Amino acid sequence: MTIAEAMRTATEHSCDMEWDAAEGLWRIGAISFDADGCALDSARLAAIDRATFIRDYIPDRAG
């Protein structure tokens, strides 16, 4: 998955995705609902598909 695809997917699911240079990770957090955020590195992002990204890295609205 490319960075652009991941950012678009995150936005479609009311989430924000930003680069944490200090940690070397992409951080994903909910914008319009309360949920724990998560993070992944660039290699993992490049290795997964959209369905895996949504399942494993988009915060669950159910909380």
Image (spheres, rainbow, N blue to C red):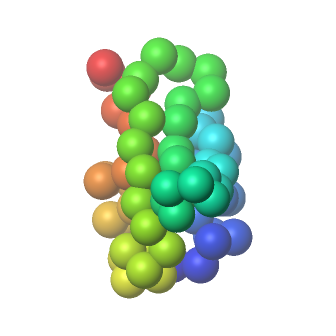
Residue 44 percent coordinates (x, y):
38, 74
Looking at the image, which is closer to me, 50 or 16? Answer: 16
Who's the residue at 52% across and 63% down the image? 24
Which of the 4 image quadrants contains residue 6? bottom right
Who's the residue at 64% across and 42% down the image? 16
Residue 12 percent coordinates (x, y):
63, 47
Residue 39 percent coordinates (x, y):
42, 51
Who's the residue at 62% across and 59% down the image? 21
**How many dots with numbers?**
0
Residue 59 percent coordinates (x, y):
40, 36
Quadrant for the C terminus, please.
Answer: top left
Q: Is residue 3 visible?
A: yes
Above or below, 50 against 7 in this view is below
Above or below, 11 against 24 in this view is above
Q: Is residue 9 visible?
A: no
Who's the residue at 61% across and 35% down the image? 14
